[in-house]
Amino acid sequence: MNTQNAEERLTRIGVIGATGYVGQELVRLICMHPYLRLIVVCSVSFTGQKYSEVVPAARGICDLVLEEVDMDRMAAECDVVITALPHGVSATMVPGLLEKGLKVLDHSGDFRFRDPALYEAAYKMPAPEQIYLDMAVYGLPELYRAELATTRLISNPGCYPTCTILGFLPLLRAGYLQLDSLIADIYSGVSGAGRKADLATSYCETESNLKPYGVLGHRHRIEMISRLEEIGAPGIKLSFTPHLAPVKRAMLASLYARPTGLFPESLEDTEALTEFYADCFADDPFVRVLPAGQLPQTKDVQYSNFIDIAAVYEPASNWLRIFTAQDNLGKGAASQAIQALNCMLGYDERTGIWLSGIHV
Amino acid sequence: MNTQNAEERLTRIGVIGATGYVGQELVRLICMHPYLRLIVVCSVSFTGQKYSEVVPAARGICDLVLEEVDMDRMAAECDVVITALPHGVSATMVPGLLEKGLKVLDHSGDFRFRDPALYEAAYKMPAPEQIYLDMAVYGLPELYRAELATTRLISNPGCYPTCTILGFLPLLRAGYLQLDSLIADIYSGVSGAGRKADLATSYCETESNLKPYGVLGHRHRIEMISRLEEIGAPGIKLSFTPHLAPVKRAMLASLYARPTGLFPESLEDTEALTEFYADCFADDPFVRVLPAGQLPQTKDVQYSNFIDIAAVYEPASNWLRIFTAQDNLGKGAASQAIQALNCMLGYDERTGIWLSGIHV
Amino acid sequence: MNTQNAEERLTRIGVIGATGYVGQELVRLICMHPYLRLIVVCSVSFTGQKYSEVVPAARGICDLVLEEVDMDRMAAECDVVITALPHGVSATMVPGLLEKGLKVLDHSGDFRFRDPALYEAAYKMPAPEQIYLDMAVYGLPELYRAELATTRLISNPGCYPTCTILGFLPLLRAGYLQLDSLIADIYSGVSGAGRKADLATSYCETESNLKPYGVLGHRHRIEMISRLEEIGAPGIKLSFTPHLAPVKRAMLASLYARPTGLFPESLEDTEALTEFYADCFADDPFVRVLPAGQLPQTKDVQYSNFIDIAAVYEPASNWLRIFTAQDNLGKGAASQAIQALNCMLGYDERTGIWLSGIHV
Amino acid sequence: MNTQNAEERLTRIGVIGATGYVGQELVRLICMHPYLRLIVVCSVSFTGQKYSEVVPAARGICDLVLEEVDMDRMAAECDVVITALPHGVSATMVPGLLEKGLKVLDHSGDFRFRDPALYEAAYKMPAPEQIYLDMAVYGLPELYRAELATTRLISNPGCYPTCTILGFLPLLRAGYLQLDSLIADIYSGVSGAGRKADLATSYCETESNLKPYGVLGHRHRIEMISRLEEIGAPGIKLSFTPHLAPVKRAMLASLYARPTGLFPESLEDTEALTEFYADCFADDPFVRVLPAGQLPQTKDVQYSNFIDIAAVYEPASNWLRIFTAQDNLGKGAASQAIQALNCMLGYDERTGIWLSGIHV
């Protein structure tokens, strides 16, 4: 990458909600990024403490003092603010940041829907004003790269939607999937539940345990369908089951769909289907379509922004199966945010996150 | 339970393959059983060592010396022999044991099929003689309790088939499932791979990792279908994906099927569907149909013979989903073997295994 | 074991604090015990719910309804009450139970000290009345078996003291250890912290993490010293460092001490030292002195009442090192309680807990 | 850091033994380093395959083909070769690389001793020629920074010695420790055992298990003593117990020593002792002396080059205790190698490894 004029290209960043798990990962990645400078970190719970007192792993790397949110100071000292806040809270804060002239990347669900009715169905509260829903670009560069380059508001996708949408994308766009036949059976790491004292995510209740949850009402289901319908067509019916696995950071999706009559017989062959997927993602550096015969595993993507994908047609049952693996805090959250930010800021999409997963 | 005449009711047991993980669990359970006496333990790899030298956890509990297989001695000193051997090996040994007059419970795949062609399709080797396939009773008491009471040869089911068959059983038997729509998406603990030096199951390659495997050719798929067709009707099409999770012992199955026109609208309600399941398993003490709204999790069944089940209909997608949790070495292998043995020997089915899971 | 007259020998048990981790393990073990009958389970937090709703692993095994403490009912229906309560709380409840004529086993620190000043130094609150301190027998059968047979109040030892005291016992009693040279470096599983919502013991903060804690003030240090001085002589100086390891249930102690001039040169040999230890514990069925050359590991004792021990003299450094492994909820808490109860009730010490560890 | 003239400052690297765990971590770090270029990767076991086929996490990041060692090609195309090989193997290869004019960093024990007799005592094989022992600089920048700047052969320290030496360093150098009183009680992650098929490090044998090993003969003990005697004085007696913990990457050392009469009473205070440590390491960016009252934990250093340290004097027992935490593949191996390489190559010591630990 061209390092000339780096000084001119620096972007000053503020993070609100810096001590949650997504926030921590953002801070770690921003500190590694050559063009981003972390200027302000905010936290409601730890105002006045050094960030590295709350997150001792960062001692020496980020010793900024955690502050209350001061929009004027942010407007004066930052170019971009990243909000890692609960839904509902983001909605109250993001408009003000935008009005101050800041660019914003938001991690909550508040700006992920074009249609406020869908938001209200998913989150059981009133949606933000339509103007912000219209302004927000869904931070999935593989789908919205061009729009990201010109927006001032990025709404980062949920972790479950990311690995589901990217998995179905090639076949769905081509019209090869029966719209009412989709299944997403996904296991997530525990960090997805956030940083909090909660018996359900305590070590002794979680270690060695596998369980499904939220089988009828997970909010991400509506988010998935709304974006899948943009790729395919209205009428998507999707069964989505999230599960919890005893892993800190990982997400493995097993996706199922029935082929339509359009699905070419030639793609029943795994080699051909793999090539079809590889072609579709040829310009997406972080999507790794695995060689035919290999299957994704989460250790290959942990602590990285990669999503690994394999697709297989099973003739005996007539199901298309797609497997995707990502880090739920990586491509599922914080590093995907940096990727989208790179798009918005005009940097090479890979800048600062072109890192191998940590295999061991 | 009636403890009278316990001395008269003792059964003498030999275990071949006692030092593998299934073998170890069998030894542990036999030592806890009031009517079983462990007389002989055999191991090819550790002949001449004390069992408790190989499995130090058992020091003081089982200090028998591991022996080579001596069928005459077994015939003289045992009533029942349990074989925990690889497929193909069991086939060479079980007929001889039967001919000596012993009763046998076998853990391999060798005697799980009535039709030798299915065995050969699954295991790519010639099937045992038909006489033994005819004699063998599939060791799933919930399906074959009466047959188990009179057989001399039990073929213990695979772990994946157990949690799949029991999950689909009530709806399939009632004709409520489209036979070509079945999906079994299952995560297993690592102990299912057996006790061996293997990079793929080493700690650093397995910890924190989630992965699918064998997506097109797992042998248990054929086993599942053959038994599901006995319950339902010929024509089952099943997509089966096994996955590996970073857990020693656990198995969670997420099962999907489309309802037929026969499926009553009344059962779309979770309470009603739960009651339907509970009725079906009313006489099966180890199948716990959870109250409506609760979902199975593996920690509730670890180290026990229970299988926990919940069934849910998802109206938005028109899928029936059934979740089952078991211990892959428990109800999926060794404790299920004791349950089947209890049936064969005329003991109360619960004897020696009526134990809570180990929650913490 | 003799099963005659079992009906006459039944003991009726109440458990107060049944839903904590120690309480859960007690319930599990009582349900497996041939002569104990669980009559009442009490819980402040879950009064009115079934035990198995709170601990679904026990569904079908223990479906008693959790109650508030009613001492009169307990006196009428129980023979023994086990209290698994925080320190301070036990002190307010145990005297009343004793006055009603009940026998009591208490898990807190409240009755572990003969000298109230030590209690007050350790727990920073006033000690219970001296009469109860005098009455209480420390529930370590290896030291106080005879006293346990005649007491009405057992005070169960802490987990750290158990594995420390038993490790030093043979050498200390013989006068072979310099009293001011003792070190106990111990790693514990997370369940020792109890069942609660706490960020510090949440999965993501605990997994993969090793850490020391309480390095200057752990309460168990005073408890250890008071019992070690009974074995040896006044003047013990002990450095004790507890650590937390990413394990649910386990405790490994590495103990160090300097030999005195009395320490015989012959015992510098590992074989001889091993024999010395084995002789000392010859009548203690749950202490397994490992063969010379083997070292304890926690997986061999998990879910059991065994404690595995090895002692080694290191000539190059002149340190005696003793390694002990136990389950912190087993020999370190609940199964040790059953062992002590067996002593008090006149059962064979092994009854109901003569179980192998769960190796896999 | 100054990025001017970066092109001129590039160093070309070859790695021999690239697919072991240390090798993999080296490849990962080299790919992140702004001035290092990975040119050649060698592997005996996987010659001819792409690196990323063996380590799929690196797909897209390092797709070099693994080669047999060709010294002439290495001499022509590389500036530095890093050898991550077993001891004994390094000894046969490193001299040849040096003779070709290459600089070498070796990870084995072969060049860690100045005195061949110590090597032979530790490794039970003849030492390399004295000329290479003389040439080698022990790759611990905190001790040998100046020597590293001018050497052509770096011998990277063992993981256990690193965290032991740095922990004792300040007190030992000042003459405050009784030389015959040292104890190092250390728990390591499983990756320290290397990448191989081995039952002892398989998932089911390792998960949830804590165990000591090699209690009388670990090779690192001799290495520790030889360097501690350089810091202090001859006559060190050290008791060293390595343990295995169920963690992939981590190392926690609990160090004990008796103070001499020189130890100032003022340093009995934790604040003062902390300041004394902080002063000692003021110029060592990767040694983080924690604020008084905080204790190291491995999650704060995982995947980083930091070592966190706290020292405490315990008046009641008269022991000095020092706790150190590092990543056994980080500061204990691969990132420490990069740090030493930075010293040798004249880069800022922090270049490419100034990274936060990965807390979650």
Image (cartoon, coloured by chain):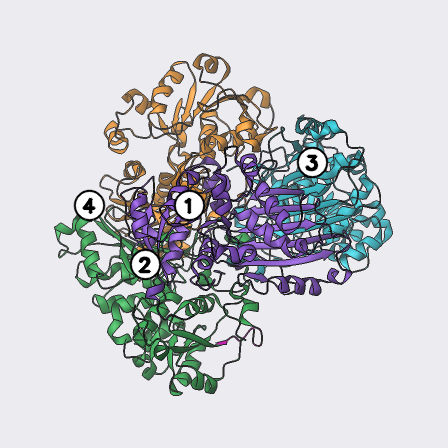
Chain colours: A purple, B cyan, C orange, D green
x then y, percent, for residue C116: 25, 27
Q: CA distance from mark 1 to mark 4?
A: 46 Å
Quadrant of the drawing holding the N terminus of chain C:
top right
User: Who is closer to the viewer here, A115 or D301?
Assistant: A115
Q: Residue at x 28, y 69 (%)?
A: D141
Instruction: Give amino acid for label 2.
Output: Ile
User: Who is closer to the viewer here, C15 or A151?
Assistant: A151
Q: Which residues are magenta?
A: D41-49
The rendered magenta stretch, by its main secondary structure, is classed as loop
Q: CA distance from mark 2 to mark 1?
A: 30 Å
Q: Earlier in the sequence, mark 4 or mark 2?
A: 2
Query: Badge 4 is on which residue?
Result: D315
Asked which secondary structure carries label 1, the reply is loop
The crowd level at tag 1 (other Cα within 10 Å; few <14, some 14-19, many 20+) is many
Q: Badge 3 sits on which subunit?
A: B
Q: Is residue D198 found left or right of C180 in the rendered image?
A: right
Assess whether residue D47 is covered by the magenta stretch: yes
User: Who is closer to the viewer here, D244 or C43?
Assistant: C43
Q: Are marks 2 and 1 on the same chain?
A: no
